[in-house]
Amino acid sequence: MRAILPRFIDAYILVLEIVVVSSVLSLIAGVFVGLGRVSKTRFTRTVASVYVEFFRGTPLLFQLLVIYVGIPAFGIGRFPNWKYFAAVIGLTLNHAAYSGEAIKGGINSIPDGQMEAARSLGMSYISAMRKVVLPQAWRNALAAIGNDQIILVKDTSLLTVIAVPEIISVFRNVNSNQLETWTPIILVCIAYLAITIPLSRLVRMLESRAEWGEEQ
């Protein structure tokens, strides 16, 4: 335990950093994807739909390999830390598609009268979407978005294939070099639960805060 624990702590911190950055970026991108999916412009809807279909229809492992191996083939990304950037880019692009679909569903759940009332007050389409529709859509989509962010945490286990020294990678090294199985398995379990359980409770707390008006 004394020999391998520092390595798991380093891997845990790295995974936490990747999760935080990827989560923030995927949520921001997901808002634009969701807006694109409900856009009144056909071209915008088509681009957003193709994006969603590609990233939901192909495995994340394939996408990571395309970014990590394929992009440097064009002379881009040939620097030592490319694997970390590839990890963040891959997770962000993949989960932005799922977050976008959740936000699209949230927007579609808002009655059309909300937009019509906002427009009748003199708001532009963008202003009405930002101030009236999106806040309500976010509340409706919160559960799906929260579940997707938990999946993102578990998807970091795939980063071992692009040489990111994350938790599963450390487990494989310990298991092969020190012939120890159950100690690193327990540490892997604790590491993931230490991220997913607080994240699940945070999502439940946000859901309860979002629903307090309805309970009143």
Image: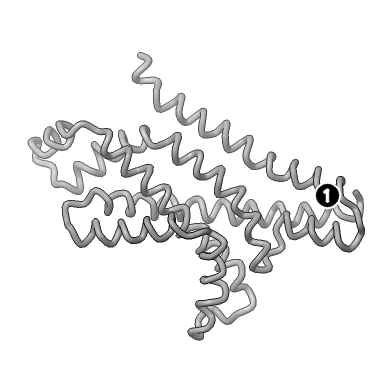
Q: Residue furthest bottom?
A: 75
Amino acid bearing label 1: Pro
> In this rendering, is residue 68 above or below 203?
below
Residue 35 locus on image (x, y percent): 28, 50
Q: Is residue 193 above or below residue 58?
A: above
User: Left or right of 190: which side holds 106?
Assistant: left
Return the x and y of residue 139 as percentages of the image width and height. Answer: 37, 33
Image-based side of 138 in relation to 181, left or right: left
Spot occupied by residue 157 in the image (x, y as percentages of width and height): 65, 54
* Nearest the eye: 42 or 153: 42
Query: Is residue 135 found left or right of 59 in the rendered image?
Result: left
Foreground pick, 64 / 79: 64
Asked which secondary structure carries label 1, the reply is helix
At x 54%, y 33%, the residue is 202
**Residue in the picture at 16% in, 47% down:** 125
Q: Is residue 158 above or below residue 194?
A: below
Residue nearest the observer in this picture, 88 or 94? 94
Single out the residue that lies furthest toward the top. 216
Indicate the quadrant where residue 52 lies.
bottom left
Q: Which residue is mark 1?
A: 184
Residue 203 percent coordinates (x, y): 51, 34
- Quadrant holding the C terminus: top left
